[in-house]
Image (spheres, rainbow, N blue to C red):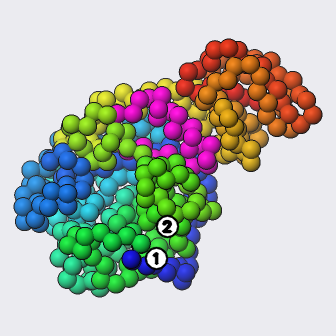
């Protein structure tokens, strides 16, 4: 089994103010988009269908996403209440969705001829959003990945340098493809030596101190990393089967597909409902985690309408309840039978997220508050104190069928 890489000699971490910003944002958009959308069988299709490099190279010249509109994507995020995006700059197939000077295998060399990452960076500056990049350490296209490991390390670190310096303030870099303790097929997954992660992490933090680093390696965080992600799972759970790493002390992020696939699949209509997405968001906040919700745009560069409806639905709920989400942190007694108790550290305001409405009375051990009201309409909820506990008398029917947020003062 592959060993965990030693990054103990990494010297730097992200600026603390950038880490605080990250934990304030709470809700982001994950985007898996590349030439694999043309096939429509997900982003791993080159591997799952065993497509040779020369055959796969026929795809990029046909990739012409003329419906892509960076401002439209940015406005959708604003409507959804999302504060940041992590987008695939390069997935395992090696095709670059940005204008890298280190390869010709990139979108700007194809029919489209534009750099969508640059356009997103400009749009995000207009909409006050934060841009981040997914970057695959694997590369099934680049010959040095198999044949000249030192040259490949130089190549990937050069691309990381480009991502940190060409597109303004970058919120995070989300690495994938390094999985210690896992032995995937050698024909597609080779490691000719160290990834030099410590050197890569220090490079990022030197070039861009506000950029947080995460690595989807499914082991406890390594030195030099700034947040820990959980794939298709809530922190501390392993329903997906590969989140075996214990929860560490770093800020957390849970990433989840809106349907069953990361990349575009026109046959996948199994979308999670808006209430399901809202509940997952609240479950994340109750575990002190961000929520990164994934969509897979079409080959033409559009986000599917079913996904747009759901994103806007979450945004409508956040317009009313967002003050109990953005920047919210769980209290020590956060987990309750009915939901979660969170607070805003800057103001001290406490909120109850009542996901499973019990009706009748609930009791919470909270000092120094004596009044309660629904956040949505400010309706007072009868409350009394008994020693250190606040007793609330709830109506029989939940005001919000998904999550009733109660503000305590």
Give residue 4's mark: 1
The residue that appears at 20% across and 72% down in the rendered structure is 187
Above/below status of 195 relative to 235: below
Q: Secondary structure at mark 1?
A: loop
- In the displayed structure, does residue 285 sit left or right of residue 194? right
> Which residue in the rendered view is the most extreme toward the right?
387
Dot 2 crowding, Cα within 10 Å, few <14, some 14–19, many 20+? many
Above/below status of 137 relative to 308: below
- Rendered location of residue 248, percent (x, y): 60, 63
- Rendered location of residue 314, percent (x, y): 47, 30
The residue that appears at 19% across and 52% down in the rendered structure is 36
- In the displayed structure, does residue 148 sit left or right of residue 182? left
Q: Quadrant of residue 322?
A: top right
- Rendered location of residue 260, percent (x, y): 32, 42
Find out whether the residues at labels 2 and 1 contact each other: C-beta distance under 8 Å.
yes
Is residue 27 among what the camera can see? Answer: yes
Measured Cα–Cα span from mark 2 to mark 1: 8 Å
Q: Secondary structure at mark 2?
A: loop
Above/below status of 191 relative to 35: below
The residue that appears at 77% across and 22% down in the rendered structure is 361
The residue that appears at 14% across and 61% down in the rendered structure is 50
Magenta extent: 271-294
Give residue 273's mark: none
Q: Earlier in the sequence, mark 2 or mark 1?
A: 1
In this view, the residue in front, 341 or 335, is 335
Is residue 169 among what the camera can see? Answer: no
Magenta region includes residue 289: yes
Q: Circle 2 sits on which residue? A: 219
Q: Quadrant of residue 242?
A: bottom left
Magenta region includes residue 196: no
């Amino acid at each position: 089994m592959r060993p965990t890489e030693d990054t103990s000699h990494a010297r730097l971490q992200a600026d603390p103010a950038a880490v605080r910003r990250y934990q304030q944002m709470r809700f982001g958009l994950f985007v898996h988009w590349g030439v694999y959308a043309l096939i429509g069988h997900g982003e791993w299709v080159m591997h799952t269908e065993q497509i040779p490099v020369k055959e796969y190279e026929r795809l990029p010249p046909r990739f012409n996403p003329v419906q892509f509109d960076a401002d439209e994507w940015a406005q959708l995020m604003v409507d959804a209440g999302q504060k940041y995006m992590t987008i695939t700059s390069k997935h395992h197939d090696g095709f670059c969705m940005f204008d890298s000077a280190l390869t010709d295998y990139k979108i700007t060399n194809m029919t489209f001829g534009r750099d969508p990452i640059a356009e997103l960076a400009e749009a995000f500056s207009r909409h006050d959003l934060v841009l981040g990049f997914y970057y695959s350490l694997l590369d099934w296209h680049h010959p040095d990945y198999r044949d000249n490991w030192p040259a490949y390390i130089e190549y990937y670190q050069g691309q990381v340098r480009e991502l940190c310096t060409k597109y303004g303030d970058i919120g995070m870099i989300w690495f994938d493809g390094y999985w210690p303790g896992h032995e995937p097929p050698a024909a597609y997954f080779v490691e000719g030596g160290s990834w030099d992660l410590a050197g890569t992490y220090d490079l990022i933090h030197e070039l861009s101190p506000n950029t947080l680093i995460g690595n989807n390696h499914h082991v406890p965080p390594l030195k030099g990393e700034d947040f820990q992600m959980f794939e298709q799972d809530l922190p501390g759970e392993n329903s997906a089967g590969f989140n075996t790493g214990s929860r560490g002390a770093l800020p957390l992020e849970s990433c989840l597909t809106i349907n069953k696939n990361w990349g575009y699949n026109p046959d996948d209509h199994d979308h999670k409902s808006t209430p399901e997405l809202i509940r997952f968001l609240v479950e994340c906040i109750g575990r002190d985690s961000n929520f990164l919700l994934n969509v897979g745009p079409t080959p033409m560069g559009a986000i599917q309408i079913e996904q747009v409806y759901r994103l806007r639905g979450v945004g409508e709920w956040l317009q009313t309840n967002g003050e109990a989400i953005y920047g919210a942190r769980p209290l020590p007694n956060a987990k309750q039978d009915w939901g979660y108790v969170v607070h805003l550290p800057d103001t001290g305001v406490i909120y109850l997220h009542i996901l499973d409405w019990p009706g009748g009375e609930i009791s919470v051990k909270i000092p120094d508050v004596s009044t309660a009201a629904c956040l949505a309409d400010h309706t007072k909820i009868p409350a009394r104190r008994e020693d250190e506990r606040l007793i609330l008398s709830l109506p029989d029917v939940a005001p919000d069928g998904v999550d009733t947020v109660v503000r305590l003062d």
